[in-house]
Amino acid sequence: MQYDIAAYIWPAYTGRESRSSVFWPQGMGEWQTVLGAAQNAPLKPTEYVWNRKPLWGPVDEADPRVMEMQIDAAVSHGVNVFIYDWYWYDRRPFLEQCLNEGFLGAANNHRMKFYLMWANHDANYTWDTRLSDSIWRENCPVWLGQVDRAGFEMIARRVIERYFSCPNYYRIGGRPVFMIYDVDNLIAGLGGVEQTREALDWFRAETVRAGHPGLELQLTGWGERVSNLSGVDGQRKLFTKEILPLLGFDSLTNYQFVHFCDMNRDYRAILRDVQEEWKRVTRDYTVPFYPHVSVGWDNNPRFNDFRPGVMKNCTPENIERALRSAQSQIDDIELIDEKLGLDSLPPPLLEIARLRLNDPEATLYELGEMCSPPIGKSGVNNRLRRLSDMAKNLREGD
């Protein structure tokens, strides 16, 4: 089975964005933070060690030649998709240079697909180590991530015209993928859940009008959050699993383990909790879930004092273990086929197993429509969960 492996790209390692001098005045983007981390070592506990050094040096990632090296390195290690953190503040984009000038200017970018995650959070002074100990850091936003309907339409038109038309833009079922980071900020900016659904439906229609077969809207999951549906304080609230179908999102993934797990532990202990979260999402959600694997977490370079949330023992072996566990759904079906033969399954499970193997990218809705007679997404999810339980029993019996 061929898998797509995507890596998030934090596009701040360049000095070409003039507005970034608010945080990094030396003109090299967040390389200023990375290279300055060693200077703060005396302020940290003696057992804390920051020993990371960029092998290629503080390269400008908006340089096409640098990006050509990164693409070659990623592809040679099995990564075939880049997910760019994409920002929009004060009615204009922020930190687009690494994508527009670097990646899209690279001669070998045909080797790598890409898509956007709209990081629609507020921008505060978290990125500025000079204000590490200041109350301004967390409580004084530089720019707000919320947008109104006019701002949302500006964003949608820009990504449709500038990015969706790229031949290497990543698609699921032929539909360009667009991920949204903060659903609460989205709802608050657009004025409520009904207005948000209308805006997203308009975005879908505009994407189709531009010649695409549809739009794959993906949400960044933060565990089971409670969202405010009104866009103002109080009022109606729902869990994320209820928000997804209400707004019409097509799929779900995560950005970092830190969003739903305690990071101040060994990687193997964290992974056990992560696997339980994957099971919960698969059980409770009706949209496809694409598992995320974090390769580390240490936010200390952005602070002068010590922050204890440091992921430990992030070895290549442990990261490989996490990646392998993320393959489970297709692998479960293949294990059952190997041990028992798919023809031994009851007809409903045999049908869904064959459909999933034939179309790994199909959504739960699409799988349900292919069934005879058609069934709903919850019915598809139930059948896939029964296959997962069967595979688990086979593994335990070996």
Image (cartoon, grey):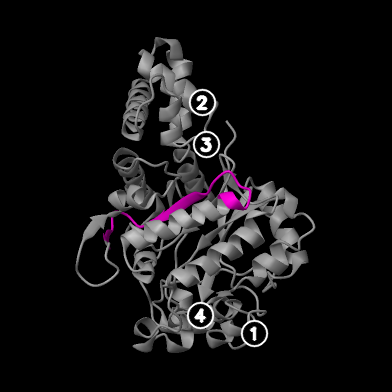
Question: Is disc 4 surrounded by few (<14), some (14 to 19) or many (20+) residues within 10 Å?
Answer: few
| Vertical comparison of 45 with 349: above or below | below
* Picture quadrant where residue 131 is located: bottom left
Q: Residue at x 42, y 22 (%)?
A: 371
Q: Is residue 209 magenta?
A: yes
CA gap, disc 2 to disc 1? 50 Å
Q: CA distance from mark 4 to mark 1?
A: 21 Å
Give the foreground label among 4 and 1.
4
- The image shows a total of numbered marks equal to 4
> On the rendered structure, is 346 left or right of 76?
left
The x, y position of residue 329, in whole percent, is: 44, 32
* Sooner in the amino-acid sequence: mark 2 or mark 1: 1
Q: Amino acid at mark 1?
A: Gly
Crowding near the residue tagged with mark 3, few <14, some 14–19, many ≥20 C-alpha atoms within 10 Å = some
Residues at marks 2 and 4, CA–CA distance in whole angstroms: 45 Å
Which residue, given by chain and number where applicable, does mark 2 sit on?
A: 357
Residue 73's place in the image compared with 135, above or below, is above
Residue 325: x, y in percent?
44, 39
- In the rendered image, which quarter contains the C terminus? top left
Q: Which residue is mark 1?
A: 27
Q: Secondary structure at mark 1?
A: loop
What amino acid type should be assigned to the residue bearing mark 4? Asp
**Badge 3 vs badge 2, beta-carbon distance below 8 Å:** no
Residue 60 falls in image quadrant: bottom right
At mark 3, the secondary structure is: loop
Which badge, 4 or 3, is on the more N-terminal residue? Answer: 4
Task: Specify whether residue 55 is in view.
Answer: no
Category of crowding for the residue at label 2, using alpha-carbon neighbours closer than 10 angstroms: few (below 14), some (14–19), many (at least 20): some
Pinpoint residue 42: horizontal percent, then vertical percent. 45, 84
Compute the Cα span from label 3 to label 1.
Answer: 42 Å
Q: Which residue is drawn at the image coordinates 58% and 81% (left, top)?
A: 32
Residue matched to label 4: 90
